[in-house]
Image: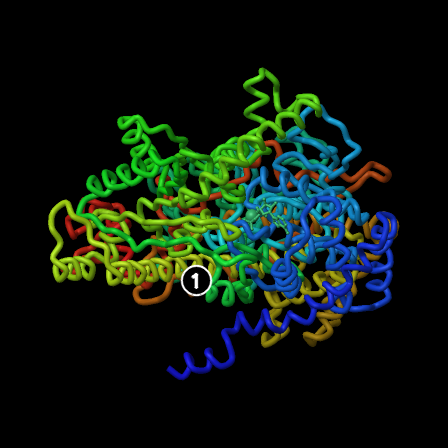
Amino acid sequence: MISTILRAVFGTKHERDVKRMQPAVAQINALEPEMQGLDDAGLAAKTDELRKRAADGEELDELLPEAFAVCREAARRRAGMRHFDVQLIGGMVLHEGTIAEMATGEGKTLVATLPAYLNALSGKGVHIVTVNDYLAKRDAQWMGPIYQALGLTVGVIQHEASFQYDPAYVTPDVRMTALRPIDRREAYAADITYGTNNEFGFDYLRDNMRFSLDELVQRELNYAIVDEVDSILIDEARTPLIISGPAEESTDLYFKIDRIIPKLKRAATIVEGKLSEVEEQKAGDFIVDEKAKTVSLTEAGIASCERLLGIDNLYDPQHIDSLHHIQQGLRAHSLFRKDVDYMVKDGEVIIVDEFTGRLMPGRRWSDGLHQAVEAKEGVRIERENQTLATITFQNYFRMYGKLAGMTGTAETEAEEFAKIYKLDVTVVPTNRSLIRLNNPDVVYKTEREKFNAVVDDIRQRNEKGQPILVGTVSIEKSERLSALLKKRGIRHEVLNAKYHEREAEIVAQAGREGAVTIATNMAGRGTDILLGGNPDFLSKEILRKKGLDPATAAPEARTAAVEEARRVTQPEHQRVVERGGLHIVGTERHESRRVDNQLRGRSGRQGDPGSSRFYLSLEDDLLRIFGSQRIQSIMDRLGMEEGEPIEHKLVTRAIGTAQKRVETHNFEIRKHLLEYDDVMNKQREIIYGMRRQILDGASQADTVAEWMEDMVAGTLDGYAPEDAHAEDWDLPGLGEALHRQFDVRVPPARYEDVVARDGLHELVTDAVKARYAEREQELGTELLRALERHEMLIVLDTQWKDHLLSIDHLKEGIGLRGYGQRDPLTEYKKEAFDLFQDMVERVKGAVVERLFKVQIVRDAPMELPAMTAWARTQELRGEVPGERPGGSPPLSIAASRPAPGPRTPTGEKIGRNDPCYCGSGKKYKKCHYLQQG
Ligand code: ADP
Ligand code: MG
C-alpha cells in the first residue's frame, strides 16, 4: 500500500532513472545545430578531438553529450536515421553498464552505436554481442557507415571467418557487401567488434590454449553490449562452452612401456621408517620408495630402458614423455595392488578408498598413473573425449570491465541479472505509445480443441487479409499446426530457427497482407516485421522472379527492384493497418513469461496497431505440471462445458503464477551450474593467469627458485621430519630423493658434520642451489630462463589437461557415491580443491625435476607440443560433461540436490527417466520431478 503511494508521488525507479537523464538529452539536443553545421570532414575530426580529450584524462561521462550528438549526426547523414530522444536515453543506460529494456522495433541496433562510439574513444575496444552470425554481420553492415563516417574501425567475427567493415571493398556477393576478410586478431583490434556470444567465448578459450602471444586474437575484455541479453545471459546460460578433444593422443605408449616393465629389476626398496638397504652400487634398475610412493631409476635402469626401447637418450626432450611413462608404469607394478588399492570391474579400474575401503567410481589417479594401471591389467585405456577448456557464459561475461545489455524483455528476470551479473534493468519508454491489444488467454480442455480454435482464428483473420504470426513451443508443434493449416488450404510459412539468414527474409514479410507465419521462439528474432512488408527484402524476391541472383545483380537492377517493391508495400501497409495490424497467436504458454512477451512484442512496434491472444489447453505441459489443480478448480467454479473455452482473468493469473514457479526452478538450475563452475573458475583464473605471464615473457626465475625451496622443504619433511631426532633421519632415502628430483648427489660424509635440522636444511639447499647454478653455467643464463618458461608452459598444460580429466570424472562420479546427508556440492568443492592442490604440487615437482634433468642441444629450437591436436578438438554447446545422452539435465546438477535421491510420495525410489508416479505417462523428470525442485 505504502509503496503504491510512494510510487504515485515519486514515480517508479525506471521513471526516476529516465528523468535523471533528461538534462543530458536536452544538452545533446542543444548541440544539434552545431553538429549539423559541420561538414563531413569536420564531423569526422570530432572523433580525434574527443579521443584526445579522453586520453588527456577527461571522463567518458563528461564527453557523453558531445559524443552522442556527434554520433547522432553521423547516423542522420549516413544511415538515414536520427536517434530519437528515447534512444539517447537507451544509449545512456547502456553506457552506465545497465540493461536497457526497449521494446521490439524501438531500434536497439541504432541505440548501441551511441555507447559503442563513446566507449571506443578510450581505444580499448567495444564488443557488440548478437545471438547469431547473421545478425552480427547484418548489424555491422547496417551500422558500419555511421562508424566509418566517424573514423572508427569495425570488425566482424563469424564462425570460422572474420571481416572488417570497408565500403571500398567490392565483392560480387551483396550479402558480403563491404566486408573485407581479415584475420581474427585484426577484427578484435578494431574499435568495435560485432560477433556472437559463442564466438567471443570460444575465442577466449582458444586463446588460453595458445603457445605464443602473437597467436592470441583477443585483447582486453573492456566493454560488451549484449543484444537480446535475456536470450544470451539467461536462456543460453544453462549450457556452458566446452572445447573437448581426445583424452590421449595415443594410448599405445602405455602398452609399449608396460611390456618392458617386467624386464626391469628392482634394486632396492625403501620402506617405512629408515632403511639403508640402498647403496649406490646396488645392482638393479629401480628403487621403490614405499613411503613416498615413488619409484626412481638407477643409472643402470636408465641404460636398460634405453636399450629396451631402442632409444639413445631418455633425457632428450623428445623422450621425456617415455621417461614419465616408465616411472608411472613402475609405480603401477610395484606400488599398486589389485583388489587392495583398486579393483577391476567390467573392464574398468576402480579405485578403492584407502581409508574407508569404499569403491570410488569416477575417481582417477592423475598424471598417467591410472592409464598405466589400466595397461598393467590389460583393460582398455579410456580414450574418451575430455574437456580441454570450458567456461559458462556467466563467468565469461563477468570478465568484462563493463557489461551492458538490451532486450525487449528483461524486467521479469531482473533478479537474476542483478544477482548473477550485477546488472540492473532500466525500462526505457517507447518512442510512440504502444496500442497493441493483448487479449486474455482462452483455455480449452484438450489440445485438439485448442488447435481447432487456433485454426479457426487464423482462417477468419486470414480471409480478411490480416497478417498473423503464430508462435509455438517446439518444431514438432509447428509441424502439427502446419499440417492442420494445409488441410484447410491456408498458405503459410514455417520457421525453425535453423537457417537464420533465409528465415530473416521470410519473417521480414510476416506483416504482409494475408501472411501466415509459424515460428518457434528464436526463429527470425532481430528482424523487423514491417506492416505491409519490407521493401528491401521484397526487392530480392522481385529480382529472383526476373531470374536474377539478388546477391550479384547489378546495382541499377537492385535499385529498380526496391522501387518496385515500395510501390507494392506502401499501399499494402495502409490496408494492413486498417485490418488491425499484425495479430499474434500463441499456441501454448512458454516456461517463462518473458518468452511469451517476446512473442507478443513482435506486434505493435513503433505505435503500429496489433493484437495478441494465447490459446491454451489443460493438456499443455505447463498447465498439467504446474497449475492444473488450481486452474481445474477455477474452471469448476466457472462451470466449464465440454468444447467450450474459458477466458477469465483468474485463469490468466493462475497461469502466471505457474510460470513464476518454473522460472524460479530454472533459475535454481542455472545457479547450481554456476556454483559448480565457480569452483573451476578460480582454478581457471590461476592457470590462465600464469600461462599469460609466461607467454608475456616475464622471467620465471623467482617462481622457479621458490618452487625449488618448496620441493626441498617437502623432501626434507619426508625423510627428516622437523620433530625427528637426527638418528632417525632416513639419510639414504633422502639421498635418493635428492638425486631423483634435483640430480644432485651429496657425498655421505658431508652429512656427518650435521646434527641439527637447520644445518641439514642449509646443506641440502646449498647443494641444490649449487647444482642449479651449474646448470646455468652449462646452458647460459638466457637459455635457462627460456627453458624455465618452456618447461613451465608444457607442464602446466599437461597437468591442467589431466586435472580437467579428473574433474570430468569427478562430476560424473560424485552423483554415484553415497554421501548420506552431505551435500554433493560441498563434496565436489572439497575434492576439486584437493585435486587442484595436488595438481599444483605436481606442477612444481615436475617443472623442477625437468629443469634439472632435461638435456638440450644448444641452438636447436625448443619445440612446443600443441596441447592437443587442434584438428581433433570439438567445440560444443548444449552439453555438459556428465550429461547423459537424451538430454537430461547434467548429473552434476542433479547431484547438487540433497541426497537421498528422488522418491515418490509413498517413499519408493524413482529414476528421473522412469514414468511419473502420477500416471501422466510422462517421464518423471518432466512431470512431478519439477514440482519437487
Ligand atoms: P529492435 O532491435 O529494437 O527490435 P531494430 O534495431 O531492428 O529494432 O530496428 C527496428 C526498425 O526501426 C528498423 O527498421 C530501423 O530502421 C528503425 N529505426 C530505428 N531507429 C530509428 C530512427 N531513429 N529513425 C528511423 N527509423 C529507425
Ligand atoms: Mg534487435
Which residue is located at x 67 percent, y 65 percent?
710
The percent position of residue 438, horizontal first and vertical second, equals 36, 54
Q: Quadrant of the C terminus?
A: bottom left
Left or right, 27 with reference to 549: right
Task: Give the answer, above or below, for where 101 lies relative to 315.
Answer: below
Residue of label 1? 412
Coloring scheme of the render?
rainbow
Q: Residues within 10 Å of mark 1 (few under 14, many from 20)?
A: some
Task: Give the answer, above or below, for where 823 lies relative to 850.
Answer: below
Task: Give the answer, above or below, for where 447 lies relative to 15.
Answer: above
The percent position of residue 378, horizontal first and vertical second, equals 43, 34
Instruction: Check the image and name the residue furthest to the bottom.
Output: 2
Which residue is located at x 54 percent, y 71 percent?
15
Q: Is residue 739 visible?
A: no
Which residue is located at x 65 percent, y 25 percent?
560
The percent position of residue 249, horizontal first and vertical second, equals 57, 34
Q: Is residue 96 visible?
A: yes
**Residue 557: quadrant of the picture:** top right
Kind of residue sitting beneath label 1:
Thr
Left or right, 929 with reference to 492: left
Q: Quadrant of the N terminus?
A: bottom left
Which residue is located at x 33 percent, y 49 percent?
613
**Residue 95: quadrant of the picture:** bottom right
Q: Element type at marker 1?
A: helix
The percent position of residue 648, horizontal first and vertical second, equals 24, 59
Instruction: Check the image and name the residue furthest to the top.
Output: 547
